[in-house]
Image: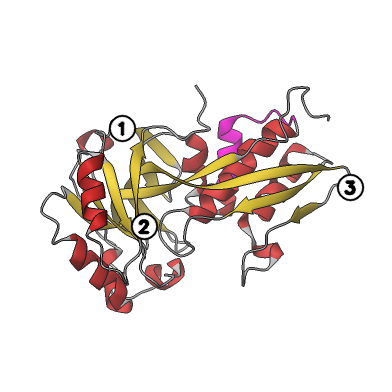
Amino acid sequence: MTPPLDADWQRAWPAPAKINLFLHVVGRRADGYHLLQTVFRFIDCCDWLRFESRHDGRIALATPLPGVPEERDLTVRAARALQQAAGCSQGATLHLEKHLPMGGGLGGGSSDAATVLVALNQLWGCGLSRPELQSIGLALGADVPVFIHGRSTFAEGVGERFTDVAVPEAWYLVLVPPVAVPTPAIFTAPDLRRDTPSIAPADWHPGFGGNDLEPVACRLYPEVVRHLAWLRRLECASRVAMSGSGACCFAEFADEAEARKAAAALPAEMTGFVAQGLDRHPLAEP
């Protein structure tokens, strides 16, 4: 297996954030996995990845994340999983430029892993289909497949069944509380609601639903409460919610000017950024 002649090892590959426009826990499987319904939307704040070709078959991480051993790093695990699935003997050195917060509910690690799969599938000339890459990604984490799928979508199950949806144009002010929320702590909490009635994807509409994980995160992390409370005082925001399992929170606006006006009023002790909603992942197939 040799890389295609047009393989571009010099480019930077984006790994955008996602937000959950709603997130309901509708049940639990016998194996303990939670059954979810959510709408994923990408936003234009990204991590970036670059790759160097290696001929020794090794996967090396040039930019280790503090406190994350290489064998647990999702980008390394994704590259090794692709090698195994495709029977590929090539290697790569991974360069990760990190902008998305860890433990923030924006899907940063999952997005990084998905971009590794999409990029190296092309650079190594593996030729795997997007569904095949999604299957590899699901074994790495429940949110990885949606970043490979690449469109605004209503997701079900453990995050692997997609029905694409139309989402109105919007801008977001995303706040980043100074805490990292470990997802297992939220899903193992005894007070997590696990019986929200499910809906058909066709019945979803903008503004529907809430985030069932938010009350647990608020109980465990007062900073999440404080940041949500500040956002909820904004008069022009059409929606305020926590994303994923937290800690990041967002307010939705109809246009950029309103989002930036809100950001300008942010207290000095709070951190946030303005982002535009994206209908498609930058690496989505045509």
* Residue 210 picture quarter: bottom left
Nearer to the camera, 180 or 275: 275
* Residue that label 2 marks: 244
Marks 1 and 3 sit apart, C-alpha to C-alpha, by: 43 Å
Using a 10 Å C-alpha cutoff, classify the residue at mark 1 as few (fewer than 14 neighbours), some (14 to 19) or many (20 or more).
many
Using a 10 Å C-alpha cutoff, classify the residue at mark 2 as few (fewer than 14 neighbours), some (14 to 19) or many (20 or more).
many
Locate residue 40 relative to residue 259 in the image: left or right.
right
* Residue that label 1 marks: 165
Nearer to the camera, 277 or 11: 11
Marks 2 and 3 sit apart, C-alpha to C-alpha, by: 38 Å
Labels 1 and 2: the sequence-earlier one: 1
Locate residue 244 relative to residue 195 in the image: left or right.
right
Residue situated furthest left in the rendering: 235
* In magenta segment, residue 127: yes
Marks 1 and 2 sit apart, C-alpha to C-alpha, by: 18 Å
Amino acid on which the number 2 mark rests in the picture: Gly
On screen, residue 60 above or below 277: below
Q: Which residues are magenta?
A: 125-137
Magenta stretch secondary structure, dominant: helix
